[in-house]
Image (cartoon, rainbow, N blue to C red):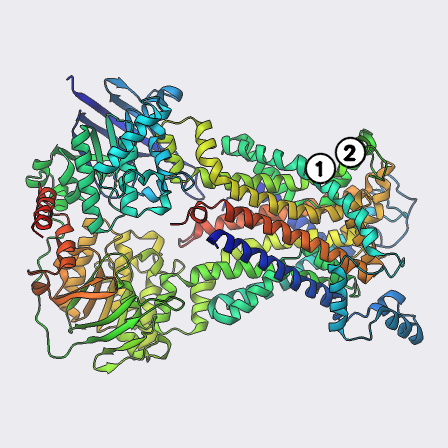
Amino acid sequence: MRVPFAAAVGLFFTALYFLAAIFAPLIAPYGMAEVVGGVWEPASAEHWLGTDNIGRDLLSRMIYGGRTTIFIAAAATVLSFTTGAVLGLLAAVLGGWADQALSRFVDLIMSIPTLIFALVVLSVMPVTLPVLVLVMGLLDSTRVYRLARAVAVDINVMDFVEAARLRGEGRGWIIFREILPNALSPLVAEMGLRFIFMVLFVSTLSFLGLGIQPPAADWGGIVKENKDGIIYGIPAALVPAIAIATLAISVNLVADWVLNRTTSLKGGRGG
Amino acid sequence: MGPIARLLAQRIALGLLLLFLVSILIFAGTQILPGDVAQSILGQSATPEALANLRAELGLNEPALSRYFDWLGGALTGDLGTALTSGQDIAGQLWTRMGNTLFLAFWAALVSVPLAIFLGLLAVRYRERWPDKLISAVTLASISVPEFLIGYVLMFFVGVQLGWAPSVSTIYDGMSLGAKLHAIALPVAVLTLVVLAHMMRMTRAAILNVMQSAYIETAELKGLSMFTIIRRHAFPNAIAPIVNVVMLNLAYLVVGVVVIEVVFTYPGMGQYLVDHVSKRDVPVVQACGLIFAAVYIGLNLVADIVSILSNPRLRHPK
Amino acid sequence: MADTLLEIKNLKIGATAYPPGEPPQEITIVDGVSLTLEKGKVLGLIGESGAGKSTIGLSAMNYGRGGVRLTGGEVLLNGRDIRPLRGGKMRAIRGAEVTYVAQSAAAAFNPAKKLMEQITEAALAHGRCSKREAEERAVTLFHKLGLPEPETFGNRYPHQVSGGQLQRAMTALALCPEPDLVIFDEPTTALDVTTQIDVLAAIKDAIRDTGVAALYITHDLAVVAQVSDEIMVLRGGKTVEYGTCDQIINNPQEEYTQALVSVRSIEHEEKQPTPEPVLRVEGVTARYSGTRFDVLETINVDLHPGQTLAVVGESGSGKSTLARVITGLLPPREGSIIFAGRTLSPDMPSRSREDLRELQMIYQMADVAMNPRQTVGTIIGRPLEFYFGLKGKAKRQRIIELLDEIELGEGFIDRYPAELSGGQKQRVCIARALAADPKLIICDEVTSALDPLVADGILKLLLSLQKREDVAYLFITHDLATVRAIADSIAVMYKGRVVRYGTKSEVLSPPFDDYTDLLLSSVPEMKLGWLEEVIEHRRMESAGH
């Protein structure tokens, strides 16, 4: 199997970030909240990325922050994905009033910009990790729902599904053997996009001060902590921002590659 | 009533219904969720008496339904209540800030829309060649980059290192237009970059979709020049999809504004909203949320209306 | 030769293909085709899909669709090679000397512009006449082409006229600049058979009256025989046979041409009705939910065991709806379906597994009738497992038997649908239906998406299976030639009613009702001069009335 260059770069960085997140305590040279130097020291042999606004090691903080960002994004993606996909497939197969009710409700939620909705809800809810994951995951599941429903409705009207119905097959067979295998590749590709969106979403919330609360931090939070340095020409805030961007781009490259591979496999063997 | 008028009336009625439902959702989101507003404001250490007083002051002891209609009635007559934290009239505060936000969004739209359409056309013209490939690479990157990264990168290099534009965008009444524009140069640039790639790609797709129609081939086989084909055959059919693209992206811009205002500490509605979310000032959050949602719904409504108006099947019924 | 209009010498056309996951490949679409067309003559290009006929037609305008390029040879138009022309010189030919009539006029007209503007556009753009002259010409053409209200027809928008009218308007568009050559690319293929004959006659008259030369592209030899002076038979981008119309139809030399000429001449002896029908449709009336009119009105037909009932009609006649009612996908408002002596429950989900098993269905589009993620073995094996509980070796054994029956063989068992040709896919669908050991198979337009020779193979297979398995077919089609080939009895449907019903010989013998007469006389026959005969006949009849 030949992996194209872009996908290889994407795979490398994705793997790097995920491994760093998993093994954070083993890799990080200092503790996350440990003050080890002066304020905004430049990069040196002891502090590869310098220190932050109150003298903590920026690299260690980045590693722990990445752990938080990736964990929240992954958890929210799983929630968004399972809720959206299950409801979307069900709506498509059941049709009728269940489909109508769900779809109109989703339309309603989607008529408010996601970030604004999240801000409204977070203004009254305590900002804790489970609340964040829940709010992000549920709000985003509307997009997965729309995609899953659209894909499943397209497949549901195909003659091979009708043929299975006419044979007398039950709902389980129709969903799991006829529809799901054909809906999988667009859904898997969407999963990558959802993950990226979640990374950006949690970063934005933290950046606005409404996500992870100090002294814990994710990448968005680290940007917020160090943003005042920018005006004095200190680029510390750019480091986590760039990490967010590279993670998102890498996952995107991998998702693109997976999608291309699965579509070229469509109906064939071996690829 | 003609079919167009009927469709338009339906669409507008639907928009109003949606707005009404959204107001319920926003109200419910802040009032019915398990969080207790009084508790949030005063914190965990508040005494029960203080909590009870605050609840009474906020009217939290009345039934939710009557509070909702009070709120909605006020909102419809321009009274958005008073802010809990400052005790100031929200409508008065919002008015200036909304003006500032619209000022920023207006200039960002003015720069980005023509630029995006021009670049989209360029991508179609050089399809599968390097300008097109560059555009799709930039798009991939731009959907992966958080708005505040673009903001800080520009601030760091253009604002601080080069000193071409102020890093903090302060504007106030009495500034000349030129001074205001100089102050918002960086946020406008960031917002433009944020929506540009999206809008470009969607414009490209919309135009390509039209250019691949059989009637464009017919026009080519009539021996018409490329310019005539685009002007007479592609353009009339591409208006609706392009307007749709623009409206979608303006809606996206409205959300982008929130983050960008915080980055550049710009005195707009987005920053006002974010400030008061952290202070848990619910009436302000409700008011801002409702206005943002209304703008969003309104832009989508305009897109639908344009596509109804430009559909020849509806304009010239059988 | 002074009167040679178009001469194509050793034309080669190529394109770049992008197979997924592989490097791009150069492919040849047309390989060494030569032809000559004299002024005022019509050359028919005929072949199956992929034969390269449209590509050759468009080469006369130096135009390649998608990434198609003219890679070699000469295209001489009025004595000069147009292949090297580019830019303005190339555009000067298109829409002026050579014009084009597309298959789907509905898509080829700009929906946002009035017809008149589009029809006169080419003539005006090339400065061939004034706006007034162009519009006068267009109105004259509307008269000639038999369009309604010719004076004001041009003020309409494309969506305001019917498909047949739009196709004629497209012909007007092509003739308005008074070109030397018109390329007709399957101009009647998308039309119903009764509409096709009028459009065909209109095109033929217009060609004769204006003295224009034409390339007429189609897959239907019977159609091309009506309008052409010469015919070129193409296959896989190469010339198979090239000769006068008379020679190709009456004295074909090549085996492939002979097969095309004799297509659908399958002989089928009709069987007589039995006392006990396997399927009885009794007074069925049906409508789709949310609509206000019946798509089927009091339908009564019988189908006898081991026989074929052909349900014939044009699009919108309700013939496919009848299939949906019988299968229970659309419960009727009135009437009942009696199958093998018992009354079926009107809606499918409440039918017994036995009822479902004995009544199988084959679809028009074989590609979407099979799950692309399942192998042929799974597709055929599922009914065996589902209805008969076959497993493992016994199941595999039966699958192989069925594959043999449809003349594919064991080697196909692990293939996916995407790896099969159109005809093979339809065979697998037949095997899936047979696997249930049914009493009745509903065949919904099963051959209409296939090339004629492939379709012939499928029909022969269906007939031989009927002999062996004694299965009855309800055969839904718009194609009367197919009906003649396989039916025992026929129901002619028109606007939701059965207008004629009986054994094949009864239905196809006079006296006819008006609609059946129109339908039967509209089916192109593989003989020269058929079109004139029919038109003349109709003219006399309408004069007589």
Identify which amino acid the numbered label 1 is placed on: Trp
Is A147 located above or below residue C121 in the figure? below
Rate crowding at label 2 as few (under 14), some (14 to 19) or many (20 or more) other CA atoms within 10 Å: some
Rate crowding at label 1 as few (under 14), some (14 to 19) or many (20 or more) other CA atoms within 10 Å: some
Q: Are marks 1 and 2 in contact (CB under 8 Å)?
A: yes
Look at the image and tell me whether residue B55 can be seen. yes
Earlier in the chain: of badge 1 and badge 2, it is: 1
Question: What residue is drawn where x is 84% and y is 42%?
Answer: A50
Q: Secondary structure at mark 1?
A: helix
Q: Does residue C20 appear to the left or right of C437 in the view shown? A: right
Residue A42 appears at what percent x and percent y? 86, 38
Question: What residue is drawn where x is 40% and y is 53%?
Answer: A268
Among the 4 quarters of the image, the one containing residue C370: bottom left
Question: What residue is drawn where x is 7% and y is 63%?
Answer: C505
Among the 4 quarters of the image, the one containing residue B85: bottom right
Look at the image and tell me whether residue C398 can be seen. no
